[in-house]
Image (cartoon, coloured by chain):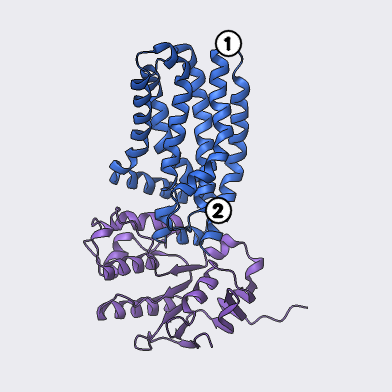
Chain colours: A blue, B purple
Amino acid sequence: MMLSAAKALAIRDLRLLWKRRGDSLQPALFALLVIVLFALALGSDSATLAKVSSAVLWVAVLLSGLLALDSLFRSDAEDGSLEQWMLAPVPLAWLVLVRTLTHWATTALPLIVCTPLLAELLQLPHAQLPMLLGSLLLGTPLLSLLGAVVAALTVGMRRSGILVALLALPLYVPVLVFGAGSVAADAQGLDGSGGLLWLAAGLVMALVLAPLTAAAAIRIALS
Amino acid sequence: MPQPQPAHPPILAARGLHFARNETAVFGPLDLSVEAGEALLVQGENGSGKTTLLRVLAGLLQADAGVIEWNGVPAARIDPLLRASAATYLGHLAALKADLTARENLEFLCGLHGQRSTQTIDGAMATVGLGGLQDSLARQLSAGQKKRLSLARLWLSPAPLWLLDEPYANLDLGGIDLVNRMVQAHLRDGGAALVTTHGAYAAPPVRTRLLTLGGNA
């Protein structure tokens, strides 16, 4: 039952994504825009660019995730889908987890796949690429899960806009610090794996706790 | 010492149910019960708390006082997921995705809630008079057709208790007759239904109990 519900939800999300593919490209295009603008602004100075490139990539991915956050539960709340989720014979937290991971796989994952190309654009030293990809692979699902809690908290509001960003940013800062920090440490020849381990630990905790918290928040928001 | 239970306890019963919003009573305290093969018609004016009552019974809202029993067992002692599979709720919001086709919408809702093994999506859509519209986008359907699509979801649901909030809204005469026939068939199969309506014009021709909510007074 839980697996068939998860499958139905994932298939629904992928179909919706395909039918609104213009909309779903927006966060990725936003990240691309930020990166290209940085590359253009610092273009003549490739040494500086190489120094900041990993941080720029991290910030661009984080901001694009923030942009996509509001769409996580809003339309489902407006058309009554969330009500049906709450009444389904599967735990709401499970559906929230599936929805969040599908959302991550369709917003953050394509960006991570493009990261080697974008890194080239920003003159990132090749030696740093594995560490950057590792930190993004661990960090972005953590961002999505933390963001799901915030999105669930604000789902009852008609216009949450900047509020989502304000609530989410304090939660995002440690992820950014450890993610970008591990790449920076690696660049200086230090061991960057400490940051990665922190991210991994955070991800494991968030995988369990974030869906439960978000489900509770949805129940409160819709009652 | 537990009370001796009748052979067939009602599918759903509530005693002393009371709900207040910001200290203003929305309804109650009230008692109700629905047995298998029976419909409970909840009547009342606009704003008399019909929708709130249904949402409380469905488990979307928490009652302030009172006991809800499913098959004679208090709701607090039942696994919430088990309770969820006992009832299906048709509310004002249709939970349809405008960008998906009618069939895709039903596939998702059946995946979420389960599906009666004796029914197919095509069969249910033909039953509600939407045969041939399986591949139309939900946004292209009229309000009445969307309602019929929700009724198809109901028809596919394996839950024994139907909680129907204003099922007659937006429907033409044929649609009203369709709701009545569906409720009749559902009760014949041993199900039960709770139907809210603001008028008596559309009572289904089945064994019916009546509950009238009397405004906020």
Residue B180 in percent (x, y) is at 35, 80
> Toward which corner of the image does residue B76 lie, by quadrant?
bottom right
Residue furthest out toward the left: B132
Task: State the image quarter where residue B140 is shown.
Answer: bottom left
Quarter of the image that includes the C terminus of chain B: bottom right
Q: Is residue A129 above or below residue A24?
A: above
What residue sits 44% from the left and 14% below the top? Answer: A48
Image coordinates of residue A43 in percent, x first then y, are 35, 16
Q: Answer few, some or many: residues within 10 Å of disc 1's Cα (few below 14, many 20 plus, some between 14 and 19).
A: few
Task: Identify the subunit bearing mark 1.
Answer: A
- Tell me if I can see residue A91 in this picture: no
Give the SS element for disc 1. Answer: loop
Give the percent coordinates (x, y) of residue B201.
Answer: 34, 88
> Considering only order in the chain, which callout, 2 or 1, is on the residue closer to the N terminus?
1
> Is A131 in front, or is B109?
A131
Q: Report which residue position mark 2 lands on.
A: A215
Graded by Cα atoms within 10 Å as few (under 14), some (14 to 19) or many (20 or more), the crowding at tag 2 reads many
Instruction: Kindly identify which numbered label has been placed on residue A189.
Output: 1
Residue drawn at 34 percent across, 30 percent down: A33
Q: Chain of mark 2?
A: A
Q: Nearer the viewer, residue A169 or A7?
A: A169
- Where residue B23 sits, quadrant-wise, is bottom right
